[in-house]
């Protein structure tokens, strides 16, 4: 079970990339909510509190530096978690593979490859129902 999961993680695939983007977006939303709910109020509290805490006003225009600091902290937390929970472990596994301590992703067997080729040929020829009970297409129909 873990070998299959590890193979899934190490396979370069568009679906895997899409899943990573969705999970990354969801994680970023969680970190953003945390920093907005807890860190931004702290920044505003430390900058004096009140109506314009975490900002300053120039000619009636409000510059909200607390939001910038909040976004910066969100970026750093997200980058650190992705690095330490995704990049570093995958780098470690890849290093072990290079040293030969761990197997790479399982290659498909010859039977699986031949079955896949057969199915693709059937699909291309549009004769998926013409095969006999042994999976072969009769000689006269080829």
Image (tube, grey):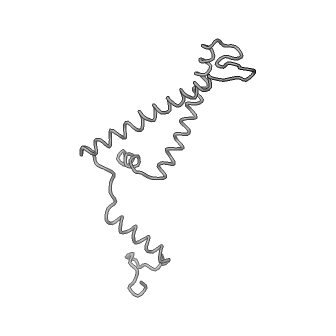
Residue furthest to the top: 48
From this view, report whether residue 128 is shown above or below residue 109. below
Is 123 left or right of 41, judged from the image as shown?
A: left
So how many labels did they put on this image?
A: 0
Q: Position of residue 131 (x, y in %)?
A: 43, 78
Residue furthest to the right: 60
Residue furthest to the front: 59
From this view, report whether residue 54 is shown above or below residue 77. above
Is 61 left or right of 11, judged from the image as shown?
A: right
Residue furthest to the bottom: 140
Residue drawn at (51%, 48%) of the image: 18
Q: Position of residue 2 (x, y in %)?
A: 36, 44
Is 134 left or right of 75, judged from the image as shown?
A: left
Q: Position of residue 23 (x, y in %)?
A: 52, 41
Where residue 141 sits, quadrant-wise, is: bottom left
From this view, report whether residue 62 is shown above or below residue 100. above
Is 2 left or right of 60, judged from the image as shown?
A: left
Residue closer to the observer: 113 or 67: 67
Q: Position of residue 21 (x, y in %)?
A: 52, 44
Residue drawn at (40%, 67%) of the image: 116
Residue closer to the observer: 137 or 92: 92
From this view, report whether residue 120 is shown above or below residue 38. below
Where does the C terminus fall, quadrant-wise?
A: bottom left
Where residue 85 sits, quadrant-wise, is: top left
Residue drawn at (53%, 36%) of the image: 27
């Amino acid at each position: 079970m873990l070998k299959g999961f590890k193979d899934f993680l190490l396979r370069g695939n568009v679906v895997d990339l899409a899943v990573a983007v969705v999970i990354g977006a969801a994680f970023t939303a969680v970190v953003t909510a945390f920093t907005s709910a807890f860190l931004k109020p702290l920044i505003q509290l430390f900058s004096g509190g009140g109506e314009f805490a975490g900002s300053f006003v120039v000619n009636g225009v409000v510059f909200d530096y607390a939001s910038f600091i909040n976004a910066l902290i969100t970026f750093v937390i997200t980058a650190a978690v992705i690095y330490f929970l995704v990049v570093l472990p995958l780098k470690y596994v890849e290093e072990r593979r290079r040293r030969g301590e761990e197997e790479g992703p399982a290659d498909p067997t010859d039977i699986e490859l031949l079955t896949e080729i057969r199915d693709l040929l059937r699909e291309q020829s549009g004769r998926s129902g013409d095969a006999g009970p042994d999976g072969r297409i009769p000689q006269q129909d080829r």
